[in-house]
Image (cartoon, rainbow, N blue to C red):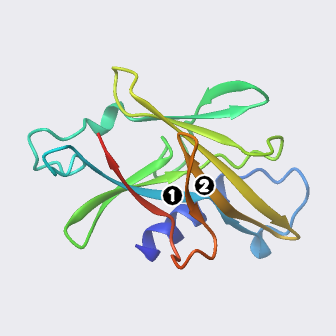
Amino acid sequence: MKNLLIVIAISTFFSCSNTDEIDELNFTLIAGLEFSIFNAQNEDLLNPGNPNHLNTDDIRLFYVINGESQEFFKGNLDNPRGYLIGEHEGIYRIGIYLNHAETEDRPITYIQWNNNIETDTIEVSYRKIQHAVIQETIWLNGEQIWEIGDNTSDPYFVLEK
């Protein structure tokens, strides 16, 4: 799991612009979250072997920037839609690149899971220090689900859909 978060952090790092002339080789950005998704029958909805799995081609991320919702798509990235799905200890997880816009106090990321517009809302507070932006607290649909230093090293949450 740590490898997945490292990939997310590095991918997000390379997607940043260099408008402030920051020494990118010495800059750290931690802005990611992982989910496993199960239904009421405890079926892994990210497992492509499950006949009831989510169509991952339909998943879209939207970042709220300056009050406007913008779909995340960066064609130059390995994961241009802002997420990565992988297996961890027999359970599939989705890693999400979270909005870290400097213009927002608590940047919002919307995850649209399918064409039926089923959407979850993630808000994040960040600690911004010289050469680093680090997520401190994460809320899912208004409920706090993770905080730095809460005895979990990686932000991970199980969703039921």
Q: Give the residue type that dot 2 points to.
A: Ile
Say which element carries label 2: strand
Looking at the picture, tell me which residue is in the foreground, 74 or 29: 29
Which residue is at 37% across, 34% downward?
Answer: 113
Q: Are marks 2 and 1 in contact (CB under 8 Å)?
A: yes
Q: Is residue 67 left or right of residue 89?
A: right
Count of numbered circles on the image = 2
Say which element carries label 1: strand
Q: Is residue 118 left or right of residue 82?
A: left
- In the rendered image, the quadrant that contains the C terminus is top left
Q: Position of residue 14 (x, y in %)?
A: 65, 58
Which residue is at 53% across, 79% downward?
Answer: 151
Check disc 2: other Cα within 10 Å, few if <14, some if 14-19, many if 20+. many
Q: Position of residue 4 (x, y in %)?
A: 44, 68
- Label ID, residue 138: 2
Check disc 1: other Cα within 10 Å, few if <14, some if 14-19, many if 20+. many
Looking at the picture, tell me which residue is in the foreground, 128 or 3: 128
**Occupied quadrant, residue 32:** bottom right
- Vertical arrangement, residue 35 with respect to residue 113, above or below: below
Q: Give the residue type that dot 1 points to.
A: Leu
- In the rendered image, the quadrant that contains the N terminus is bottom left
| Residue beneath disc 1 | 33
Q: Nearer the viewer, mark 2 or mark 1?
A: 2
- Vertical arrangement, residue 17 with respect to residue 63, above or below: below
Q: Of callouts 2 and 1, which one flags the residue occurring earlier in the amino acid sequence?
A: 1
Q: Is residue 77 left or right of residue 36?
A: right
Gap in angstroms between the C-alphas marked 2 and 1: 9 Å
Determine the residue located farthest toward the front in the rendered image: 143
Which residue is at 50% across, 68% downward?
Answer: 5
Which residue is at 70% across, 43% downward?
Answer: 107
Q: Position of residue 160 (x, y in %)?
A: 30, 45
Q: Position of residue 38 (x, y in %)?
A: 24, 49
